[in-house]
Amino acid sequence: MAHLGAEIVRVGAGTTELRLRRKDTLLQQHGYFHGGVIATLADVAGGYAGFSLMGPDDSVLTVEFKLNIMAPGDGEELRALGQVIRSGRTLTITRADVFVRKDGRETLCATALQTLMRMAGKREQDQF
């Protein structure tokens, strides 16, 4: 995430908000945020939302991920909101919405649904 330049805006119990400012290295051929960048931000937002409800010696692993891109990532910044839908003993389901901001206006550009697996006793390594 440091390589992309993503920032954690806030983390709460079962929620996260991330931000990623536009850089030329994150864009595809039409000048939009690349779909892989949008997907990565959604995956991390959902992952950290789920991870926020796990124990200090646990880690998290994405085992299923679906992304719908509904509008181009055309703007100055992406903002991702991750939220836990259901937290179980082993599997956690999350949703992440990714918004693109252009000229002060936000547009929902993608929504992801994700299944996470809790990895008990495998401490998370800091990626920011």
Image (cartoon, helix red, strand yellow):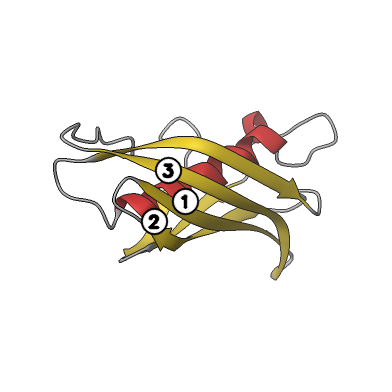
* Up/down of 31 relative to 21, above or below: above
Which of the labelled discs sits on residue 116, or is there none? 3
Residue in the foreground of this view, choosing between 127 and 7: 127
Q: Residue at x 37, y 50 (%)?
A: 48
- How crowded is the residue under tag 1: few (<14 C-alpha within 10 Å), some, or many (20+)? many
Query: Could you give the CA–CA distance between mark 1 and mark 2, rounded to whole angstroms?
Result: 6 Å
Amino acid under disc 2: Ala
First-in-chain label (2 vs 3): 2
**Would residue 34 be seen by someone viewing this image from the given angle?**
no
First-in-chain label (3 vs 1): 1
Which of the labelled discs sits on residue 49, or is there none? 2
- Left or right: 70, with 124 as reference point: right
Quarter of the image where one finds residue 25: top right
Amino acid under disc 3: Leu
Q: Residue furthest front?
A: 89
Residue in the foreground of this view, choosing between 31 and 121: 121
Residue on which the image places disc 1:
45
